[in-house]
Image (spheres, helix red, strand yellow):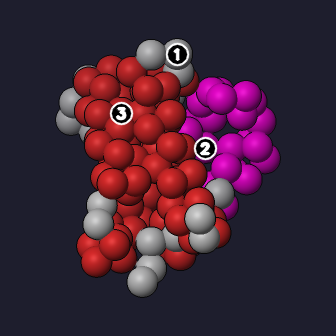
């Protein structure tokens, strides 16, 4: 299997695992990232985003080759869309996922860019 396919499948597995975490073992951790301005209950937001991640992860793995590039752009957009949650965690000094200092929460903000690149590169034609 070529490295790009391994990377794409790993991205899908990452998304599925994160989505399962939203629904189960990391639910409270993800609630700490929901910005106050989101009009839904924090738990509902976490559940819906978890379902979205499971669906995106599954689609990343099974999407036919001719649609993978579009799928990658969609996932990159999702990673951009959840960035406000990471910003809210930093701005509101909310501890979760072991991020217990301002510096750790700030560093987390810069991890979004590699996720976006991963989504785009692992799915390009």
Lower sequence index among marks 2 and 1: 1
**Element type at mark 3:** helix
**Which residue does the numbered mark 2 point to in the structure image?**
90
Mark 2 to mark 1: distance in Å?
22 Å
Left or right of residue 51, residue 76 in this image: right
* Residue ID at (51%, 54%): 9
**Which residue does the numbered mark 3 point to in the structure image?**
50
Relative height, residue 27 to residue 71 (above, below): above
Mark 2 to mark 3: distance in Å?
21 Å
Q: Residues within 10 Å of mark 2 (few under 14, many from 20)?
A: many
**Which residue does the numbered mark 1 point to in the structure image?**
25
Give the image location of residue 91, x and y in percent: 57, 44
Say which quadrant the N terminus sits in: bottom right
Quarter of the figure with residue 104: top right
Image depth: mark 2 or mark 1 in front: 1
Give the image location of residue 31, x and y in percent: 44, 25
Give the image location of residue 29, x and y in percent: 54, 24
Q: Residues within 10 Å of mark 3 (few under 14, many from 20)?
A: many
* Residue ID at (45%, 16%): 24
Q: Which residues are magenta?
A: 89-110
**Element type at mark 2:** helix
Relative height, residue 53 to residue 60 (above, below): above
């Amino acid at each position: 299997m070529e490295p790009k396919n391994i990377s794409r499948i790993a991205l899908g597995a990452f998304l599925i695992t994160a989505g399962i975490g939203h629904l189960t073992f990391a639910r409270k951790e993800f609630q700490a990232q929901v910005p106050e301005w989101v009009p839904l209950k924090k738990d509902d937001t976490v559940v819906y985003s978890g379902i979205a991640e499971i669906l995106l992860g599954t689609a990343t793995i099974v999407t036919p080759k001719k649609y993978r590039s579009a799928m990658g752009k969609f996932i990159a957009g999702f990673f951009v869309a959840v960035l406000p949650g990471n910003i809210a965690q930093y701005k509101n000094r909310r501890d979760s996922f072991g991020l217990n200092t301002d510096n750790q929460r700030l560093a987390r903000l810069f991890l979004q860019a590699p996720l976006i690149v991963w989504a785009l590169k692992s799915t390009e034609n």
